[in-house]
C-alpha cells in the first residue's frame, strides 16, 4: 500500500460516497419472543438455517431424471420440507435451461415466500476499494438483498488477506463506510472468515526492506478489526469449523523482542466477549485429524468432534444467533447426486435436537 493510499482520510472516503446521507444507526438486534429457551432448545425452529453453498450442486444442476431436486424452486421446496427456515445465499443463478433464461431475484423471493422461508444473508461481493463504480456495484447488491427481504448482507472473504496492521486499518475504514451504507438500507453488513483471519497481526518489531513490521504484539487480525470497526454497522459470521482450525494452526507468534510466545485461540471465549456482534454462524462440523494441516476434516453436523451443544449453550444471548449449516464437500457429484440434500437433512436433525 502506498503512502498516498494510507493517507486517504475518512472525510475523503465519505466524500466519494456522496449521496449516502442520513444513514440509520442500527443497534444490536434484541432477542425476539420466538427465541425462547423453552425445553432447553438451543436453536429455535425459526432460526435453523442453511447456506446454499452446501447444496450448490443441486441449485446449479441441469434438469435430470435422477429424482433429486434441482434449481431454486425444487431445492428450496425440499429444504422447507426438511424443516429449514432461514436461507443464506451463495449466488443467485441456476441453470438457464430450467426457465430458458436466468431466474430473477423477484422470482426467488416468491419461491421463498411460497415455502415459508426467509432470506437471512448472502455471500455477496463487498468492495475492496471505495470508488463511484464499486459503490454502485455494492448498491446493486443491496437492491437484491432488499428484494429478497434480507436482514444481513455479507461476504465469504476476509476484509483483507494481509497480515499487516496498515492494511487492516484501511480495511476497517472501508468497512465502516460500507456498513453505514448498508444500515441506511436497513441491512447489517457482515464478514465471514476462515482460519487465516485469526492468525497474529504483524504490528511491531524491526521493519523489513519494504518498511513493514515483522513481529506481533500478540493480537489476532480479526480481533484487531473488531476494535477498529463500528459495532453498530459491522458484524460477523463465525464459521465455527474454521475457528477450530485456527485453534489448531495459529497458536504461536514472535513478540516485539523476538521471543516466541504461545497463545491458544479460544473461539467460544471470543464470541462470549462480543456475542451481539455475531448474529450469524456457520454450523459446520469436522472430525479431528491432527495429521492434516487444518487439524479437522469436514463432516455432517453431529458426525464430527466439535461440541456444538456446549458452544451454543455458552456463547451468550441464547436464541439471538442464526446458525446456517454448511459443509464445503457435501455435493456428491454424478456418482451420488443426492448426497448434499441427505447431508442437509442429517444436519438439520442434529441441529434441532441440540439442548442445553
Image (tube, rainbow, N blue to C red):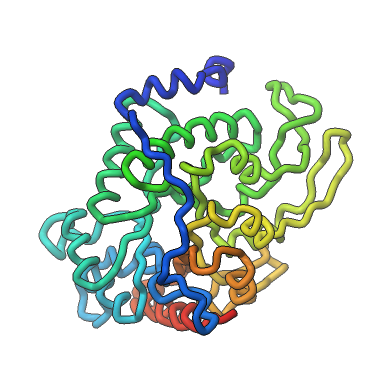
In the picture as drawn, the residue positioned furthest to the left comes out as: 100
Residue plotted at (43% across, 39% down): 179
In percent of width and height, residue 140 lies at 27, 40
64 over 157 or under it: above or below: below
Task: From the viewer's perspective, tell me whether residue 128 is left or right of residue 223.
Answer: left
Between 128 and 280, the one lying in front of the other is 280
Identify the image quadrant of the C terminus.
bottom right
Residue plotted at (55% across, 63% down): 317
Between 196 and 170, the one lying in front of the other is 170
In the picture as drawn, the residue positioned furthest to the top comes out as: 4
In percent of width and height, residue 202 lies at 71, 35
Tell me if I can see residue 186 in this picture. yes
In percent of width and height, residue 309 lies at 60, 76
176 over 36 or under it: above or below: above
Task: From the viewer's perspective, tell me whether residue 167 is left or right of residue 97.
Answer: right
Task: From the viewer's perspective, tell me whether residue 277 is left or right of residue 101.
Answer: right
| Count of numbered circles on the image | 0
Amino acid at each position: 500500500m502506498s503512502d498516498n493510499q494510507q493517507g486517504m482520510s475518512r472525510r475523503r472516503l465519505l466524500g466519494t460516497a456522496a449521496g449516502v446521507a442520513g444513514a440509520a444507526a442500527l443497534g444490536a438486534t434484541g432477542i425476539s419472543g420466538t427465541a425462547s429457551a423453552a425445553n432447553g432448545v438451543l436453536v429455535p425452529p425459526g432460526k435453523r438455517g442453511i447456506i446454499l453453498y452446501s447444496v450448490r450442486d443441486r441449485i446449479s444442476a441441469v434438469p435430470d431424471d435422477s429424482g433429486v431436486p434441482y434449481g431454486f424452486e425444487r431445492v428450496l421446496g425440499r429444504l422447507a420440507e426438511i424443516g429449514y427456515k432461514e436461507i443464506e445465499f451463495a449466488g443467485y443463478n441456476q441453470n438457464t435451461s430450467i426457465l430458458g433464461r436466468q431466474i430473477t431475484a423477484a422470482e426467488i423471493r416468491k419461491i421463498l415466500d411460497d415455502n415459508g422461508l426467509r432470506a437471512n444473508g448472502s455471500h455477496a461481493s463487498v468492495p475492496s476499494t471505495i470508488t463511484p463504480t464499486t459503490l454502485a456495484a455494492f448498491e446493486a447488491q443491496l437492491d437484491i438483498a432488499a428484494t429478497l427481504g434480507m436482514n444481513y448482507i455479507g461476504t465469504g472473504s476476509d476484509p483483507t488477506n494481509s497480515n499487516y496492521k496498515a492494511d487492516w486499518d484501511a480495511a476497517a475504514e472501508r468497512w465502516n463506510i460500507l456498513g453505514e451504507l448498508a444500515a441506511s438500507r436497513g441491512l447489517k453488513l457482515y464478514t465471514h472468515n476462515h482460519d487465516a483471519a485469526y492468525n497474529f497481526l504483524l504490528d511491531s518489531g524491526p521493519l523489513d526492506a519494504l518498511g513493514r513490521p515483522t513481529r506481533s504484539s500478540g493480537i489476532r487480525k480479526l480481533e484487531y478489526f473488531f476494535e477498529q470497526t463500528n459495532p453498530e454497522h459491522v458484524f460477523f459470521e463465525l464459521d465455527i469449523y474454521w475457528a477450530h482450525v485456527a485453534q489448531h494452526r495459529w497458536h504461536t507468534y514472535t513478540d516485539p523482542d523476538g521471543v516466541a510466545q504461545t497463545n491458544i485461540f479460544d473461539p467460544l471465549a471470543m464470541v462470549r466477549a462480543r456475542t451481539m456482534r455475531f448474529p450469524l454462524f456457520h454450523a459446520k462440523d469436522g472430525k479431528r485429524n491432527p495429521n492434516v494441516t487444518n487439524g479437522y476434516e469436514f463432516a455432517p453436523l453431529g458426525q464430527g468432534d466439535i461440541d456444538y451443544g456446549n458452544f451454543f449453550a455458552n456463547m451468550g444471548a441464547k436464541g439471538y444467533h442464526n446458525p446456517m449449516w454448511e459443509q464445503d464437500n457435501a455435493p456428491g457429484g454424478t456418482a451420488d447426486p443426492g448426497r448434499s440434500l441427505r447431508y442437509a437433512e442429517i444436519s438439520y436433525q442434529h441441529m434441532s435436537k441440540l439442548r442445553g
